[in-house]
Amino acid sequence: MSDPRVLCLHGYHGSGAILRDQMKSLTGSLPADIEFVYVNAPSLATGDFGWWHEGFDGWEHTRDWAIDLVCAGPRFDGIFGFSQGAALAGLLTAIQESGSAPPEFHFDFAVMVGGFTSDLPQHTDLLRHKLTTPSAHVIGRGDVIVPRKDSLRLADRFANPLIIEHPGGHIVPDHRAAAGPIADFIAAQKEAAP
């Protein structure tokens, strides 16, 4: 793998610029050769916010937008999501593995921070099997917005999740206990790539 390129998905009420700021301490302690690409939810263009609303309303629009973005190139090696963006990263990983997206829709790993999963019937088929894409799940033990148990349920959707816990809340941690394992995880994916 050449220098890793990672698609970054912000949280609810967020934006690409906000996530860049939230990740600044973390990315500062990761290898400089990783390119992080921050995007805005498609609804931000109309003054809305979030990738979807209650009950995953708007999910289909976001799904189609994300598939078009990834397929348009250049290639993304990984996906990083925070909060609702982490839930989206999990669903996009499921789409990738379902075979329902074009072959160009592909990434090698996923990092999810403060994420949760869907239990809605519309996602049942996507989440029927354990996902095999390498994944890292960063969980704040003090998170009161997305409780630890919800992040663990997202991690449980994956066959072999790396779980990284930190003492903070609903944040992208800059804590060494998180940055080191995330760096090691991305480096391992880079080594494993053809």
Image: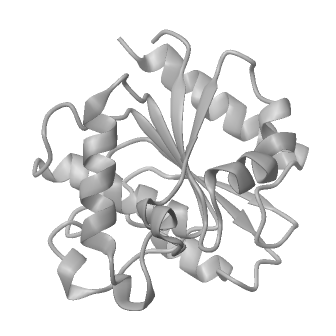
Q: How is the image coloured?
A: one colour
Q: Residue at x 14, y 33 (%)?
A: 103
Q: Residue at x 32, y 46 (%)?
A: 132
* Res 131 seen here: no
Query: Would you say 19 lies left or right of 26 here?
Result: left
Residue 152 rendering spot, x and y as whole percentages: 55, 71
Q: Foreground residue, 151 or 53?
A: 53
Query: Would you say 31 lies left or right of 148 here?
Result: right
Q: Residue at x 19, y 81 (%)?
A: 122
Residue 63 rendering spot, x and y as whole percentages: 28, 60
> Where the C terminus falls, by quadrant?
top left
In the image, residue 98 sits, relative to residue 11, either above or below, namely above
Name which quarter of the figure residue 53 lies in: bottom left
Residue 187 rendering spot, x and y as whole percentages: 61, 22
Q: Residue at x 87, y 68 (%)?
A: 168
Q: Foreground residue, 76 or 190?
A: 76
